[in-house]
Image (spheres, helix red, strand yellow):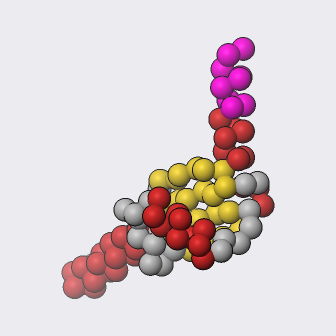
């Protein structure tokens, strides 16, 4: 089956745009909803991120702090993440 080259190019552009938007999307996971002043602190701490369309989600497993995901990158500033790192370090010592 032959695909129309014009249709193929348009589809390629749409997929590239969608991937670019997902790479720029900032998703913040926290144990409880953040107040506006807490959101401003995060924005000042990480000014390189695109905070205009940031999504804030509640995840009780975070315990305390936040986990920030941007595309395939993760910034873990949570208590659960710190405990997991400590646990992994202790297992490595054995």
- In the displayed structure, 86 sits above or below 44; it is above
Q: State whether residue 51 is above or below residue 88.
A: below
Describe residue 88's horizontal placement relative to residue 21 as left or right.
Answer: right
Examine the rendering and report whether any part of residue 71 can be seen: no
Residue nearer the viewer, 41 or 73: 41
Magenta span: predominant SS is: helix
Residue 45 place in picture, x, y as percent: 47, 59
- Residue reaching furthest front? 37
Residue 28, quarter of picture: bottom right
- Could you tell me which residue is drawn at 72 percent across and 39 percent down? 83
| Coordinates of residue 27 in the picture (x, y in percent) | 55, 67
| In magenta segment, residue 87 | yes
Residue at the image point whose x is 47% and y is 53% from the top: 73
Give whichever of 32, 88 is nearer the camera: 32
Residue 66 image point, x, y percent = 63, 58
Q: Quadrant of the N terminus?
A: bottom left
Quadrant occupied by the C terminus: top right
Extreme residue toward the top, this view: 94
Q: Is residue 62 above or below residue 28?
A: above
Give the image quarter of residue 68.
bottom right
Residue 85 among magenta residues: no
Whether residue 78 can be seen here? yes
- Name the residue: 74% across, 67% down: 32
Quick check: 8 left or right of 50?
A: left
The answer to whether residue 14 is left or right of residue 29 is left
Residue at 72% from the left image edge and 46% from the top image edge: 80
Disc count in the image? 0
Residue extent of the magenta highlight: 86-94
């Amino acid at each position: 089956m032959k695909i129309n080259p014009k249709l193929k190019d348009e589809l390629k552009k749409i997929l590239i745009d969608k991937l670019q938007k997902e790479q720029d999307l900032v998703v913040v996971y926290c144990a409880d909803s953040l107040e506006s002043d807490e959101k401003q602190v995060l924005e000042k701490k990480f000014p390189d991120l695109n905070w205009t369309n940031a999504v804030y989600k509640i995840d009780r497993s975070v315990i305390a702090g936040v986990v920030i995901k941007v595309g395939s990158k993760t910034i873990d500033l949570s208590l659960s993440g710190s405990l997991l790192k400590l646990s992994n370090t202790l297992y490595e010592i054995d």
